[in-house]
Each structure stands twice: as C-alpha cells, then as structure tokens.
Image (cartoon, helix red, strand yellow):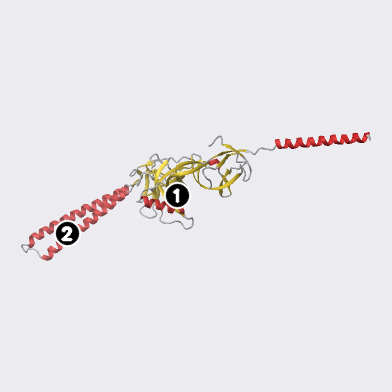
Amino acid sequence: MTVDRRATALLAMIGGLAVMAGCGESVSAKREAPRPPEVGVIQPIERVLPEWQVYTGRLEAVDRVEVRARVTGFVERVHFDEGAVVGRGDLLYELDSRTFVAGRDAAKARVDEAEARFALARSESERVEGLIVHRAVSQEELDQRRHQVDAGAATLAAARAALENEELALEFTRVMAPVSGRIGRALVTEGNLVSGGSGDATVLTTIVSLDPIYFRFPIDEPTALRLREVVDAARESVPVELSLSGRDEFARRGRLDFLDNRIDEETGTLLVRAVFGNRDAALVPGAFGRVRLQIDPPRTRLLVPEKSLGIDQTQEVLMVVGDDGVVERRVVSTGPVTDGWRVIRSGIDPGQRVVVEGLQVARPGTTVTPRPAETIR
C-alpha cells in the first residue's frame, strides 16, 4: 500500500513537470515568432514636367558628294590632306593640262580667223550697199554679200562657243571642292589616269558636309499621328534634344526638320528627321545616337525611383505595400526617366507606398514591415 502511494505521487510529479515544460515551450514559441521582414518604402512624388519621347537613330550629312573628274587625264597633283576639313572651291586635284592648253589655243586661233572673215564680209557688204545706189552692182550681188555676213557671224559664234568649251575643259583639269565639309581618303593618287565626262567618271574622293547635320529616326504610328497634329496646329517646329552613343545627357538641342509623307506598312513607323548645329564638328555622319522630343505640354506627373521597377516577362511592375502590410504587385505604364526617376503614367495612386529597398523579400502576398526608405538614388 505504501509503495503504491509512492508510485502514484511520483507519477503525478512527473506529469506536473511535463505540463510545466509544455507551457514553457508554448510561451517561448510565441515570444520567438519571426517578425515580418522590413522593406523601405516611399510615396510617389509629383512634379510638373514635360514628357519626352526617346528614339534611336543615326546622324547623316546634309550633303554627301562623290567628287568625280569631268575630263579624262592623268593626275598630276593631289592638293588635300585626307580627313581634313575643306571649303567650297578649294583645289583638290590637278590633272595634266597640256593637251587642254593646246586645244584652247587652237580654238582661240579659229576665233581669230572667224573674226577676220566676218570683218571682211561685213566690209564688202557695206561697200556693195554703197554701190547699189548708183546701180553699179546688181541686187543679186548685194544679197550674196549679205549672206556672207550672216554666214560669217554664225561661224564666229560657233568658234567662240568651241573656245568656251575648250576653256571649260582646261578649267576642269583643276578639280575643286563642290561643298564644304570633311573630305575622305584619296581614291586616286598622282600618276593615275582618270576618266571623266560620263556616267562612268572616276570617283576621286568623297566629301560630307558637317554643319548643319541631320539625325534620322523612325517613330511609332500613334506618336506619328499625334506629332503631325501638334506640328499642324502650332505651325512651328517641335524641339528635339540629342544624346550621342554611350552618353546619358541630352546636350545638343535642335529642331524637327522633316516628317515623311507615309507610314511604312511593314514596320508601322514614320521616318522623321531633325537638324542640329555642328560648328565644332563633334557630330560625325553615320554615328548612332538617341533623340528625345517633347510633344505634350508640361503637366503634373507621378515619379518613382528607377530602381524600384521590376520586369515580369514583358510587363513593368512595382511592389506596393497595402494598409495591412501585405505586398501587392502592380503592373504599371511608364514614361521617360528624369534624373533617375521614372514617370508612371498609370497603375498606382499618389498616396500608395512603393517598395524601393528590400525588393528581394517583397513578394506578392507576403506580409512585411514598411519603413521610410533611407536613401533614394
């Protein structure tokens, strides 16, 4: 009997200890429950900004000229440095002119001969006209003399035209720059024979103009229609800014110069051209770049840091924390970037909290602890 009581008491004591241990574990579990992860959030800022549309394209020269020979001859001298800037009318090539000098001199001699014949025919005609009054000569002879004067005048005119042609041929042995710009390499060097005066005339070099310079780029159809409305309504050019390849700033300012007359059916784009000043010759034809153009007037826009945006397949998304601390995924429509801030056209409201720090733990449907973001860049 005594043994049974001791056994019962021992079992009761063991059970009590087990209950106490279970209660301690429950309290400890509640105390050690993990806190929702912290994320840095901000509210979108509002600014009055113009909206720029950004497009890519290439620079092209206003004038690109293939310099060709107008006459056939041997190159006697090259007068330019390859890659240099030349002015309109600068001497580029000089061809052997001896044959053309001889041709000009022969043409001059024919002019002198034609002038002498014309002077003699006119003198004889005047003399016959004086004799006709006294009936010393017949009317037929007078008509012949007058015909000789007319023939002499025609011969003289032909001779003078031939001389002018020979003088032009001699002038063409000196090949001048037809436009100002940067010259390319010499495709023909001294001592080579070049052909001229036909469609197969030898190309001697090329020149591209520098100032001003064009930038050609395609724009999408909706923007093209809107741009056409703006241009037609304002009757003035739309401002355009240029950024060269590898640079972020849009430092060059120009104006819209040309809109094509049709939208390409295959690409759904309209070819557009802008013109920029290039006095420093820093813009090189053929170079890649970006332009932005302002179509709509400035108005209030929502902006969020560029780093807060994510990509889900083809959609841009933001993570937003609701009042209950639960993360929501919002698909947004975005605009251009301004100083590291992205314009948001639709998808969020001004008062919402956008996750900018801790995006790796902000998953849709998870609970987080929002705090004001420390740094925004």
What percent of the width, then of the height, locates residue 212? 38, 44
Give left or right: position of 357 versus 103. Answer: right
- Residue in the foreground of this view, choosing between 56 and 284: 56
Q: Secondary structure at mark 1?
A: strand
User: Above or below — where is 372 with respect to 160?
Assistant: above
Q: Secondary structure at mark 2?
A: helix
Few, some or many residues within 10 Å of mark 2 (<14, 14–19, 20+): many
The first of marks 2 and 1 along the sequence is 2
Quarter containing the N terminus? top right
- Residue in the foreground of this view, choosing between 323 and 276: 323
Q: Which mark is residue 287?
A: none
Give left or right: position of 376 versus 273. Answer: right
Dot 1 amino acid type? Phe
Dot 2 amino acid type? Val
- Residue in the foreground of this view, choosing between 167 and 377: 377
What percent of the width, then of the height, locates residue 280? 39, 39
Q: Which mark is residue 217?
A: 1
Give left or right: position of 244 versus 174. Answer: right
Disc 2 vs disc 1: which is toward the camera?
1
- Residue at x-position 14% and y-position 57%: 122
- Residue at x-position 72% and y-position 37%: 29
Give left or right: position of 135 versus 263. Answer: left
Few, some or many residues within 10 Å of mark 1 (<14, 14–19, 20+): some
- Residue in the foreground of this view, choosing between 286 and 274: 274
Would you say the residues marked 2 and 1 are in contact, meaning their CB atoms lie under 8 Å apart? no
What percent of the width, then of the height, locates residue 266? 49, 57
Report the residue marked by disc 2: 149
